[in-house]
Image (cartoon, rainbow, N blue to C red):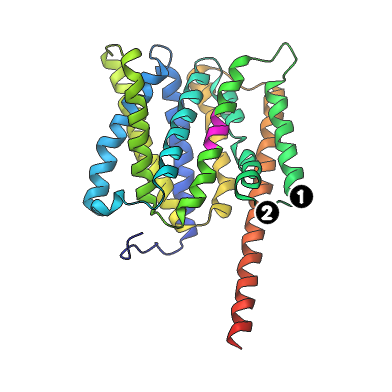
Amino acid sequence: MSDSYERPAENKPVALLLLLLTTVMFATGDSIAKLAVGTLHPVQMLFVRCAIVVAFTVPYALWKIGPAVFHTDHPKTQVFRGFAILGSSFLFVSGLSHLPLADASAINFVWPLLITVLSVLMLKEKVGVRRWAATLLGFAGMLLIIRPGTSAFQMAALYPLGAALLWSFAAVVTRSVSAHDRAATTLVWTSLVMLAGATVLIPFFWRPMNGQEWLLMSLIGGISIVGHSMLVFAYERASASFLAPFSYAQLVWATILGYLVFGSLPDRWIAAGAILIVASGIYTAHREHVRAREARERAARGNGDHAS
């Protein structure tokens, strides 16, 4: 990382406001995507969205930071992260063509629980009994939503579930690069890798778009640029353990927009499952906060002992 980079000072109120605004924006973007996927293939949607994002984010990053924004100590990890997010985006948009917005969003929000599992498997992190219990509770909520083995089960539910899994992989590898690469570097690499992947596939799925489709895709691209930028700014100003529980506000907005735009509401099973997933995620974030605080206290005591 460049020596000139200085992390912004902590500002939790501003970070929380930014995060809550992103939940509104992402839910709105998902609603627009559900409208567009009725006529456009998900690959074409992703290609146009990625092209718009790259057209704005890369020149802006070069203007603000310069060529140093492309420097990374982990190029392979950055490429893996980009393709994981591309796959996650493709699966989620594909799910929107078959599932109500709130249902797809509720299933997709199992990703914080999957991060817990992957952190143990990939990063060898230690997870206590209470966090495992919370994770199992969240998975129980997911099963209530998709109800495998019953007549209510839809194969399309596997789309947002797969999207959550890929997003979790991306989040876990992000931890390994965040200590060395600035947030803007990760954002630029992810945008470029996603565009490269979509470009390889687009010849098989492209068709001319009409004015309404261009408008929808421009809105999705704009929301993605602003939303992800605000998300980066939020996480630069407050810890993930503080912000994570508030991310579930997106489910509320998805439910509201699903009703206002598409006239659909979750049934009681989906609502109950979503409540379990949210409760589990909030408790998991709380335990992350507790562990981070305890680690800081141990480090402070260690420094005190060393100084004495």
Image spot of residue 132 (x, y percent): 74, 45
Front residue of this view, candidates 272 and 76: 76
- Neighbours of disc 1 within 10 Å: few (<14), some (14-19), many (20+): few
- Neighbours of disc 2 within 10 Å: few (<14), some (14-19), many (20+): some
Does residue 86 belong to the magenta stretch?
no
Q: In this view, does 143 lie to the left or right of 256?
A: right
Find disc 2 in the rendering and name its residue: 287
Residue type at mark 2?
Arg
Does residue 165 belong to the magenta stretch?
yes
Residue type at mark 1?
Arg
Q: In this view, does 243 lie to the left or right of 138?
A: left
Front residue of this view, candidates 119 and 207: 119
Write down the quadrant of residue 34 in the picture.
top left
Question: How much space separates mark 2 and mark 1, taking CA atoms?
Answer: 8 Å
Q: Is residue 210 above or below residue 217?
A: above
At 37% from the left and 28% from the top, the residue drawn is 197
Q: Do the residues labelled 2 and 1 touch (CB within 8 Å)?
A: yes
Residue segment shown in magenta = 163-167
Disc assigned to residue 130: 1
Image spot of residue 37 (x, y percent): 42, 16
Identify the secondary structure beneath mark 2: helix
Upstream in the sequence, badge 2 or badge 1? Answer: 1
At 54% from the left and 45% from the top, the residue drawn is 172
Magenta-drawn stretch, dominant element (helix, strand or loop): helix
